[in-house]
């Protein structure tokens, strides 16, 4: 009966291909639906007659909360329908797999081979106010922006896929010019899709993704990807953004980046639920001369060298209620402005170590109450340590030619709304020391990265679904009280030196910053 079923499935597939080629699109879908129903009915009958166990498919190594690492279902391929010979003996599981492949092929022939697109569009208004160190005020009562993300996915096989995202982040209307603060750094590669400016459509991410359930014959699921990797809106910061988390721990890393990653699931090896480690490496700046210079792309005349970063993410345990994670990174040849040279010139100043660890509870207790079951809390600690390059003419790092260590801690909670069924409240607090320096320039806060604050940052937000999970509304309040300057500067002494704000009455140094944001967001 099994082989007759496979034969009928194949025959139906081949016949439908010819017939549907002559019909309209509606007729194609109707024919497809009839074939699917017939195959499902025969498959159900086959299941009821079989007593052989069906092997369970292994779970992919990808994070359940890592949306950017999820490849789409296979939508393309050149696999052919193959008739099963009568003398071949297959297990029920193998025959089910054959049937699944045949149904996938039918689906491809009906729908065609194409990239799958989805849209993420957000309109927001921010009310910004700043108190400067000399007591003066600066503000923008209503800053309107449109942010568009076009997500694309294409899976050639069950192992290999492509994922990308096109993006713009645009201020309403034409941007007015400013005389004393040029906007050149807004197009800097680390923040080019996060900085609100014009309507240029950029590639925010684009990478291929390979996955398998075994590594070198061992029961270790693994993945590898290469390209412009998703490295913004990572773990913990994704909660307020109402996004799936990308790979990095956002306490220390939140920038766009080009590179590679390899992830290995260790649950079967360690016996710890959800355990894995991930190796990451990339290049944040390339030292290269222009295309039509005397020696194209040679990089001989630049003052800044290639910026390379490598790191490891380790999650020892994650059962979706209790999770623990750690991350270490090192970046070399980091930069700052060269104030001794006319024009916008960057120079290499040194390297930077960062490390962070977090713990999160998603659901307090077990059945204590609806409110606690749906309440999330987390705590994260982080440190940074500079590695300044010394020598004649070197500016040092953060105002010193010696290594300096900074620290930060971050706590937060998210809990159900008491005024609506689906809404959620969130509250967060973080503190940073005078020499604290993360790489979080792409954080989605108009007033600057709150996690980079050398001082205290407070945040409260409310997120409410308006139409299922398609249309959402959020109201957010962020307040940053700086103790030291340079929180949003680079890594050298020219922009990153921490100066005590209480004793530095300067009109160009921010003492306190406030950002009140409201947005409506469409995702489908």
Image (cartoon, grey):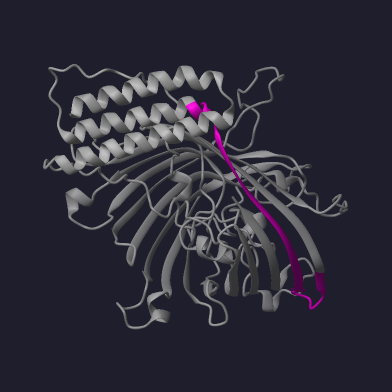
- Which residue is found at the position 79% from the left and 62% from the top? 143
Q: Nearer the viewer, residue 62 or 416?
A: 416
The image shows a total of numbered marks equal to: 0
Q: Is residue 116 magenta?
A: yes
Say if 211 sits above or below 141 in the image.
above
Quick check: 302 above or below 56? above
Question: Residue 92: horizontal and vertical position, in percent?
Answer: 17, 35
> Does 41 sit left or right of 477 as displayed?
left
**Is 36 included in the stretch rendered in magenta?**
no
The image shows residue 507 at horizontal and vertical percentages of 80, 69
Q: Main secondary structure of the magenta part?
A: strand
Q: Is residue 18 left or right of residue 510?
A: left
Residue beneath the point at 67% across and 74% down: 501
**Residue 58 drawn at (x, y percent):** 25, 44
Q: Nearer the viewer, residue 241 or 347?
A: 241
Quadrant in the picture for residue 82:
top left
Is 446 drawn above or below residue 231 in the view shown? below
Look at the image and tell me whether residue 489 can be seen. no
Displayed quadrant of residue 249: bottom left
Q: Provide residue 268's location: percent of width, then percent of height.
A: 19, 49
Foreground residue, 344 or 172? 172
Residue nearest the viewer, comparing 243 with 428: 243
- Asked whether the viewer can see residue 375, the reply is yes
Residue pictured at 52% horizontal, 28% vertical: 28
Quadrant the N terminus occupies: top left
Magenta segment: 110-139
């Amino acid at each position: 009966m099994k082989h007759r079923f496979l034969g009928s499935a194949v025959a139906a597939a081949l016949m439908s291909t010819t017939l549907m080629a002559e019909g309209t699109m509606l007729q194609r879908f109707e024919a497809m639906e009839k074939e699917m129903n017939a195959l499902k009915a025969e498959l159900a009958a086959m299941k009821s007659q079989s007593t052989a166990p069906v092997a369970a498919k292994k779970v992919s190594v990808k994070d359940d909360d890592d949306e950017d690492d999820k490849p789409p279902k296979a939508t393309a391929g050149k696999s052919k329908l193959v008739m099963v010979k009568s003398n071949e003996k297959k297990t029920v599981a193998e025959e089910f797999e054959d049937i699944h492949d045949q149904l996938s092929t039918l689906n491809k022939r009906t729908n065609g081979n194409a990239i799958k697109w989805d849209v993420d569009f957000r309109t927001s208004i921010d009310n910004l106010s700043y108190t400067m160190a000399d007591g003066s005020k600066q503000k923008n009562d209503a800053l309107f922006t449109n942010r568009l993300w076009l997500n694309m996915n294409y899976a050639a096989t069950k192992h290999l896929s492509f994922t990308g995202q096109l993006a713009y982040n645009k201020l309403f209307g034409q941007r007015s010019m400013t005389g004393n603060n040029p906007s050149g750094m807004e197009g800097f590669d680390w923040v080019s899709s996060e900085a609100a400016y014009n309507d240029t459509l950029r590639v925010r991410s684009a990478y291929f993704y390979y996955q398998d359930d075994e590594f070198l014959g061992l029961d270790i699921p693994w993945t590898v990807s290469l390209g412009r990797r998703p490295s913004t809106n990572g773990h913990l910061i994704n909660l307020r953004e109402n996004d799936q988390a990308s790979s990095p721990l956002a306490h220390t890393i939140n920038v766009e980046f080009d590179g590679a990653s390899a992830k290995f699931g260790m649950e079967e090896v360690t016996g710890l639920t959800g355990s894995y480690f991930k190796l990451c490496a990339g290049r944040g700046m390339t030292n290269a001369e222009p295309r039509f210079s005397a020696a194209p792309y040679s990089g001989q005349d630049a003052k800044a060298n290639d910026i390379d970063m490598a790191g490891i993410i380790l999650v020892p345990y994650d059962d979706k209620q209790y999770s623990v994670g750690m991350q270490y990174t090192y970046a070399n040849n980091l930069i700052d402005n060269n104030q001794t040279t006319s024009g916008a010139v960057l120079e290499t100043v040194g390297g930077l170590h960062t490390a962070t660890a977090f713990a999160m509870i998603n659901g307090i207790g077990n059945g204590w109450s609806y409110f606690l079951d749906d309440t999330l809390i987390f705590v994260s600690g982080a440190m940074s340590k500079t590695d300044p390059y010394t020598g004649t003419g070197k500016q040092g790092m953060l105002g010193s030619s010696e290594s300096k260590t900074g620290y930060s801690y971050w706590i937060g909670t998210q809990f159900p709304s008491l005024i609506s069924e689906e809404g959620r409240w969130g509250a967060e607090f973080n503190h940073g020391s005078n020499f604290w320096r993360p790489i979080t320039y792409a954080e989605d806060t108009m007033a600057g990265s709150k996690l980079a604050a050398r001082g205290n940052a407070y945040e409260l937000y409310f997120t409410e679904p308006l139409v299922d999970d398609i249309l959402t509304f959020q109201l957010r309040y962020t307040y940053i009280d700086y103790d030291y300057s340079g929180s949003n500067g680079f890594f050298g002494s020219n922009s990153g030196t921490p100066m005590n704000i209480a004793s530095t009455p300067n009109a160009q140094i921010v003492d306190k910053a406030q950002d009140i944001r409201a947005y409506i967001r469409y995702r489908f």
